[in-house]
Amino acid sequence: MRILLTNDDGLYAEGMSALVDVARQFGEVKVVAPDRERSACGHSMTLRDPLRAQPVDYDGLAAWEVSGVPVDCVNVGLELAWPDGCDLVLSGFNHGPNLGFDVTYSGTVAGAMEGCINGIHSISLSMALFVSGAPLHFETGIRWAQERLGALIEHKLPPLTFFNVNVPAIAYEELRGERVVGMGQRVYQERLEIRSDPWGRPYYWQGGVVAMSGDQAGTDVEAVSEGFVSITPVSLDWTNHAAIRDVEAALNR
């Protein structure tokens, strides 16, 4: 199996090293990742600046550092690493959760999304940490993926669908299993903070506090909060098909 690895935390992030440890057992691995952290870049791509791809040796694997975002990395990877195509795109392990609405912001998820757009079976993986400064427990992600990722790799998904996986950042012995669930709601409140520079001029710092209720039954938010690995099949078709007829009827009144 030909495997392309990417992430949004940079080539030398600990999460990439953890994912390499897992991916090696499934096939031939090549790595194409950003040359610096690109968190929260979403499904963006570089159009008006040139991309640079620097080949490097990564623990004996062919690898490239790219001066772009994860979408760029996947497309560069399909040109340089696997010009004849590959069988699997893995993106991660992200240094933090990608739950619910996070998938729209996440560069990690965008890497899998771009693989899916290119017709490649794709999976994004994140370590769901909620307490700043606590350990990310990559060893838990590695062990779970070594034991369970194979089933997701072998499973044939419908067209335009990829997997988004969140592993709770807890000790492996504390994991309660996994759940296949839908996306929950993870909303950022007070996301824009106004500050002043030393000359009194305003600037704006974006981030905010996550408001995440635990009563989201059947979702990734609930699963991870209860100690389960969440597995969400994500569709690239964002159409609300149920609303089409209602809108048509409204326009024809």
Image (cartoon, rainbow, N blue to C red):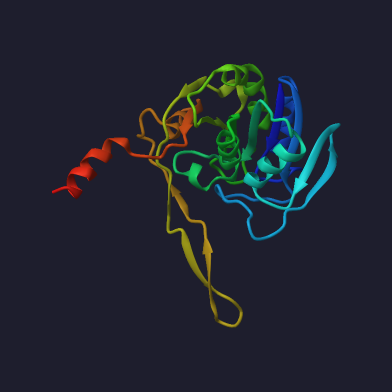
| Closer to us: 142 or 37 | 37
Q: How many marks?
A: 0
Residue lying at 39% horizontally and 36% vertically, measured from the top left: 214
Question: Between residues 55 and 171, which one lies in front from this camera angle?
Answer: 55
Residue 145 picture location, percent across and down: 63, 23
Residue found at x 56% / y 23%: 174
- Give the quarter of the image for residue 150: top right
Q: Which residue extends farthest bottom?
A: 199
**Residue 91 at least partly seen:** yes
Name which residue lies at 43% across and 43% down. 186
At 63% from the left edge and 28% from the top edge, which residue is drawn? 141
Q: Position of residue 222 (x, y in %)?
A: 42, 31
Q: Is residue 41 above or below residue 93?
A: below
Q: Quadrant of the N terminus?
A: top right
Residue 227 horizontal side relative to residue 16, left or right? left
Residue 251 vs residue 234, the one in the foreground: 251
Q: Where does the image place residue 95, in percent across and percent down from the top left?
A: 63, 41
- Visible in this render: residue 169? no
Residue 105 horizontal/vertical position (percent): 52, 48
Outermost residue to the left = 253
Q: Is residue 81 left or right of residue 191?
A: right
Residue positioned most to the front: 252
Answer above or below: position of 182 versus 55. Answer: above
The reply, left or right, for residue 193 in relation to residue 32 is left
